[in-house]
Amino acid sequence: MRRLPFLIPDNFTLALVGTVVLATLLPCKGAAAVAVNWVTNVAIGLLFFLHGAKLSREAVLAGAMHWRLHAVVLLSTFAMFPLLGLAMKPLVAPLVTPALYTGILFLCTLPSTVQSSIAFTSIARGNVPAAVCSASASSLLGIFLTPALVSIVVTNHAATTGSGWHTVGAIVMQLLVPFLAGQLLRPVIGAWVDRNRGLLRFVDQGSILLVVYTAFSEAVNEGLWHHLPLPALAGLFLVNALLLAAALAITTFTSRRLGFNREDRITIIFCGSKKSLASGIPMAKVIFASHAVGAVVLPLMLFHQMQLMVCAALAQRWARDTQAERAEPVAAEPR
């Protein structure tokens, strides 16, 4: 187990599981559900406001000129993944329920992660400034591209709340406007936010847990677990594993064929193969009808843990390889 620490779930994953259990046993209803939903919306707005105040423009500008790398990452995130989701339908349909397949398609339309993509790129000795730029651009573009892609690839329109433009407008008001407000106020509060990163982590994780609780409460009240047999959950695990493996293989092959150096390949693989739980769960709350959100976010929650485990192992391995390559010439020199 000392060699495989990435197999141990982190505290946040355990908190997610605990939240699902709590929503299953004690789902909120009536006036309590209205109050929790209001608090959740405020928490999501605060989350994106703080992210806007935290984002360093200097770091983004440092990697902004690497347009070929960014183009590959964005195409992987918003073109490769949706195509994989659609292409896998003949395999997926017998394994999971229609609601879970809708969740898989939604997962495929989401932007890349920001924090973990940058963190893993840094651990593996990749191009960190480019990772900051690509992940941030993916997160911002996802506000517009995700609802548009959902309207194209998701055929179960009964699960969504309205037209694509209505959804874009709702996401802009709930996510982008607070983010831009945070960016505008960064000169005033940016230093305070940087000194209090624990607050951002608390709001980040707390808002996600609130959304998960409200989503699963609504889904449980609608009979979620009666419509999700155990074989479908096992099938979901298999589908997510195949989707992640395909994304990692394609980004690795493509980055090599296009002639990127080692540092850039690491950035492309980590930024182009991951999906954002922090953006995805709030978006699901806006895009999908309340009774459908619980089943829709299940694939994302599972994929989130799988990508963290696999990418942590890859980052540690590539870091060791880089360290060994740098040490080898020194060891070969005569004393």
Image (spheres, helix red, strand yellow):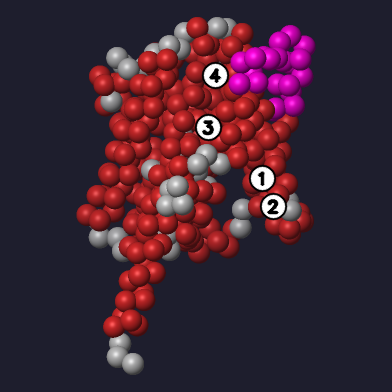
Secondary element at tag 1:
helix
**Mark 2, residue position:** 197
Is 37 included in the stretch rendered in magenta? Answer: yes
The CA distance from mark 2 to mark 1 is 6 Å
Residue 154, x across and y down, in percent: 40, 20
When asked about the image quadrant of residue 285, the answer is: top right
The CA distance from mark 2 to mark 3 is 22 Å
Label 3 is placed on what type of residue?
Gly
> Dot 3: few (<14), some (14–19), or many (≥20) neighbours within 10 Å?
many
**Mark 1, residue position:** 201
Disc sitting over residue 280 in the figure: 3
| Circle 4/circle 1 CB separation < 8 Å | no
The CA distance from mark 3 to mark 1 is 17 Å
| Circle 2/circle 1 CB separation < 8 Å | yes
Between residues 316 and 36, which one lies in front from this camera angle? 316
Residue 162, x across and y down, in percent: 53, 16
| Circle 2/circle 4 CB separation < 8 Å | no
Label 2 is placed on what type of residue?
Arg
**Mark 4, residue position:** 294
Q: Give the range drawn in magenta.
A: 21-41
Would residue 254 be seen by someone viewing this image from the given angle?
A: yes
Looking at the image, tell me whether mark 3 or mark 1 is earlier in sequence order. Answer: 1
